């Protein structure tokens, strides 16, 4: 077999064109769908059966079960889906991904679609230079579709021919019953892990079948291995994720592994069932006719996944319970300081990455709000040990928030390096501004805590009026926080700046009132000078805190005006 370095590079290059085409097609479809994709996913998962349909639909559209799984993980993290609902979507994604095999077997081998691919690229290439982001995404979609089949066409010619001795070598391992199936299952698993795409491995398997290099039964075993391989990739990505990400990945693994096990138990009979269906439908036996193997393999792939869903859909709550026992959530506040939404490996597209960042910023802001609650508790506390514990917690919040800002900023920087629409770019700029202001909110909280600590260490006492004024200022800040959190939750389209400005004016006016009263009290010696300084520092810092809070809402709303 004469196969040199140039041939090897050609093989890798054709596989790269195929993978890049799949990636481009998937990402552009998600850009075209945009918010609609997310709305479908969140609205059509009220029960696990609708979730299956949704998973099939989304995966069939974006042509990537991995992208669907990552999307599901982000929605579980965001609280838009629970784990039971996510099970249905993941099961549906397994069915949806079989569309790729059908496209390849029906078009890639039956029609010389690469002859139409180049003209398609020629027609759609000008769209890539369109200033309209939607038209540009449609152009990317068409070119991605063309590249998939160009890559497949090149792949068919680049895969090395196998001579008789090599065929004899393979044949020696193809007649050992279940052990042969396990060997080729292992090969399919390893190939999928190495290539990082079950679609690409499926394409390679179909090419080898079409050329008659492996038999139908061993190709089917490889397909089973590809189903396991794609879940291992997801679990590797979830290793750095939060418990929700890990549980979702574990459910995906359990679902596919169990499916492979029951199919292996009836493997021989299952394949003969496919053969009987092919013959009764007017086709030929995939064991006798090489040309019928790609379609038979697609039928096997689809039937296996559909039956696996029908079998396991009833056990979704049970799978969830097992995953919760496998991945236990940390107790207390220890986990609270971990990233909740963007620590799940890689994002599949910039659109999904923006959604993940948005949810992480909401969590970041919520933590700053909780920090303010600790500050209020510190202000009201009189017992020394509890004061020390609160101060320790507030300092822990401050350090965690500093680190969180850096982590989110790094993620946004990575996002900004990808190809973005104008709206996406504006959203990322707003997010950079928002996390900077949220970090400043945390700094103000910490400054308030230090001022309260100084009051306690100096044993300074406030008058009843001073106490009442500080408590009233705290209520204004609480209102400002509530509106900020609501605006972050509503997002870019529905955020309400009027309410935010109203509370901001109330804070400013109250600060001005307290400042005038403070000056008069100092002149009249209404309280001790040190008490006045600490009192002034507290209400002034609160006003500064209010400024940063409204800046967050302004950053979100600013997108509407661009």
Image (cartoon, grey):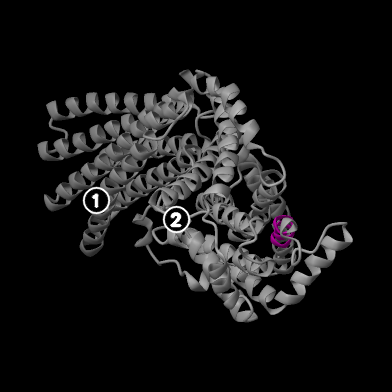
Counting the numbered discs, the total is 2
The residue that appears at 39% across and 59% down in the rendered structure is 240
Secondary structure beneath dot 1 equals helix
What segment carries the magenta color?
293-301
Q: Which mark is residue 466?
A: none
The residue that appears at 60% across and 41% down in the rendered structure is 149
Tell me: residue 536, above or below residue 251. above
- Looking at the image, tell me whether mark 2 or mark 1 is earlier in sequence order: 2
The residue that appears at 56% across and 53% down in the rendered structure is 69
Question: Is residue 517 highlighted in magenta?
Answer: no
**Distance (Cα) linking label 2 and label 1:** 58 Å
User: Within the image, what quadrant is residue 417 found in?
Assistant: top left
Q: Which x, y percent locates residue 472?
A: 36, 37
Of 309 and 40, nearer the camera is 309
Tell me: residue 265, above or below residue 440. below
Of 464 and 298, nearer the camera is 298
Q: Is residue 22 left or right of residue 277?
A: left
Q: Nearer the viewer, mark 2 or mark 1?
A: 2
Q: Is residue 321 left or right of residue 12?
A: right
Helix, strand or loop for the magenta stretch, by majority: helix
User: Within the image, what quadrant is residue 443 found in?
Assistant: top left
**Label 1, on which residue?**
399
What is the crowding at mark 2: few (fewer than 14 residues within 10 Å), some, or many (at least 20)?
Answer: few
User: Visible in this render: residue 493?
Assistant: yes
Tell me: residue 113, above or below residue 105. above
The residue that appears at 37% across and 60% down in the rendered structure is 335
**Label 2, on which residue?**
3
Query: Which of the image's four quarters has the C terminus?
Result: top left
User: Visible in this render: residue 322?
Assistant: no
Of 182 and 56, nearer the camera is 182
């Amino acid at each position: 077999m004469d196969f040199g370095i140039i041939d090897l590079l050609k093989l890798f290059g054709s596989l790269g064109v195929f993978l890049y085409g799949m990636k481009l097609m998937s990402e552009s479809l998600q850009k075209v769908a945009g918010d609609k994709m997310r709305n479908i996913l969140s609205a059509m998962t009220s029960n696990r059966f609708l979730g299956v349909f949704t998973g099939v639909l989304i995966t069939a559209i974006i042509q990537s079960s991995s992208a669907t799984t990552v999307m599901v993980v982000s929605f579980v993290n965001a609280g838009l889906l629970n784990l039971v609902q996510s099970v249905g979507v993941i099961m549906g994604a397994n069915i949806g991904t079989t569309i790729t095999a059908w496209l390849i077997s029906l078009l890639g081998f039956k029609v010389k679609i690469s002859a139409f691919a180049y003209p398609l690229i020629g027609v759609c290439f000008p769209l890539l230079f369109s200033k309209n982001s939607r038209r540009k995404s449609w152009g990317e979609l068409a070119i991605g579709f063309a590249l998939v089949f160009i890559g497949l066409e090149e792949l068919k010619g680049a895969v090395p021919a196998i001579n008789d001795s090599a065929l004899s070598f393979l044949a020696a391992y193809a007649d050992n019953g279940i052990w042969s199936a396990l060997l080729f299952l292992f090969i399919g698993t390893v190939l999928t892990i190495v290539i990082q795409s079950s679609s690409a491995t499926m394409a390679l398997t179909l090419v080898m079948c079409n050329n008659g290099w492996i038999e139908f039964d061993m190709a089917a075993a490889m397909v089973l291995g590809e189903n396991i391989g794609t879940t291992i990739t997801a679990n590797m990505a979830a290793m750095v994720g939060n418990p929700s990400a890990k549980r979702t990945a574990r459910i995906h693994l359990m679902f596919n592994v169990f499916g492979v096990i029951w199919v292996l138990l009836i493997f021989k009979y299952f394949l003969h069932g496919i053969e009987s269906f092919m013959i009764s439908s007017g086709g030929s036996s995939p064991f006798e006719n090489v040309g019928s193997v790609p379609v038979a393999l697609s039928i096997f792939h689809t039937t296996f996944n559909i039956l696996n869903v029908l079998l396991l859909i009833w056990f979704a709550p049970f799978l969830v319970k097992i995953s919760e026992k496998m991945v236990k959530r940390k107790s207390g506040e220890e986990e609270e300081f971990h990233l909740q939404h963007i620590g799940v490996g890689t994002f599949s597209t910039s659109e999904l990455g923006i959604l993940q960042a948005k949810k992480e910023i909401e969590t970041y802001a919520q933590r700053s709000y909780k920090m303010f609650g600790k500050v209020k508790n510190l202000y009201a506390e009189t017992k020394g040990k509890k004061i020390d514990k609160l101060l320790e917690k507030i300092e822990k919040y401050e350090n965690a928030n500093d680190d969180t800002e850096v982590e989110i900023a790094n993620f946004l920087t990575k996002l900004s390096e990808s190809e973005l629409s104008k709206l996406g770019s504006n959203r990322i700029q707003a997010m950079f501004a928002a996390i900077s202001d949220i970090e400043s909110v945390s700094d103000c909280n910490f400054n308030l805590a230090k001022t309260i600590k100084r009051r306690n260490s100096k044993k300074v006492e406030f008058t009843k009026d001073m106490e009442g004024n500080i408590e009233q200022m705290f209520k204004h800040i609480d209102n400002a926080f509530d509106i900020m959190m609501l605006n972050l939750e509503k997002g870019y389209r529905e955020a309400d700046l009027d309410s935010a400005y109203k509370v901001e004016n109330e804070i400013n006016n109250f600060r001005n009132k307290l400042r005038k009263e403070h000056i008069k009290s100092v002149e009249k010696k209404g309280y001790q000078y040190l008490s006045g300084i600490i009192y002034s520092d507290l209400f002034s810092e609160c006003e500064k805190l209010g400024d940063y809070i409204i800046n967050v809402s302004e950053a979100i709303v600013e997108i509407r005006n661009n």
